[in-house]
Amino acid sequence: MNKLIIPAVLVATAMFAIQNKRYFTMPLEKDPTREVGLQSVTMPPGAGNQFHRHPGEQWTAVQEGEVTFTVQGKPPQVLKAGDSNYVPRGTIHRQQNLTDKPARYIEMRIFDKDKPAAEQIGQ
């Protein structure tokens, strides 16, 4: 019985254990209405986020593990260490770690200033 409870608790808590480390956020040169930022994201096994969209562009580069990237309405794409992708403004998407090992990636974003970084999409 305990062997079943511990994995269930780990999966339940993994959904909330995504760690972001922001390196910087600063005004975009020559366009003070936008900001550029760089952050690293560590995603535990079984973790992920809901479908969402951003007020700007996002570039992702996987450094460790695998991240399943899904654009709403399209088949999932598995990104492995060394892979990268570009998310255009307003694209509804999500990231998940569907493996049993941690994943780590960096994101560079150019977003509209003073707007929420993400808008959750019901699903």
Image: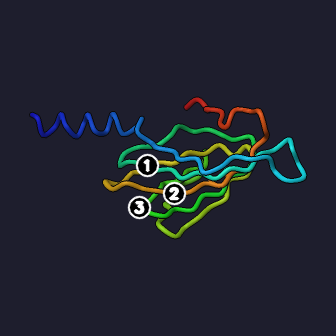
- Report the Cα–Cα distance between label 2 and label 1: 8 Å
Residue furthest toward the top?
A: 122
Most distant residue in the left direction: 1
**102 left or right, relative to 54:** left
Numbered mark located on residue 105 in the image? 2
Write down the residue under mark 3: 65
Cα separation, mark 2 vs mark 3, equals: 9 Å
Q: Quadrant of the image for the N terminus?
A: top left
**Is mark 2 in CB contact (under 8 Å) with mark 3?**
no
User: Callout 2: 10 Å neighbours few (<14), some, many (20+)?
Assistant: many
Estimate the spatial distance between the alpha carbons at disc 1 and disc 3, rounded to whole Å: 9 Å
16 on left or right of 121: left
- Name which residue type carries label 3: Gly
Mark 2 vs 1: CB contact within 8 A: yes
Q: Which residue does the image show at 61% across and 38% down from the upper left? A: 52
Q: Which mark is residue 108?
A: none
In the orientation shown, which residue stands out farthest toward the right? 30
Which element is circle 3 on? loop
Compared to 77, does 113 lie above or below? above
> x%, y% of residue 53?
66, 40
Q: Which residue is identified by label 1?
A: 43
Q: x%, y% of residue 17? A: 40, 39
Q: Which of 2 and 73 is in front in this view?
A: 2
- Which quadrant would residue 32 be assigned to in this image? top right
Q: In which quarter of the image is the C terminus?
A: top right
- The residue lying at 64 percent from left, 53 percent from top is 38
Q: In which quarter of the image is residue 7?
A: top left
Three-letter code for the amino acid on which mark 2 is drawn: Tyr
Q: Badges 1 and 3: C-beta atoms under 8 Å apart? A: yes
Is 32 drawn above or below residue 5 in the view shown?
A: below
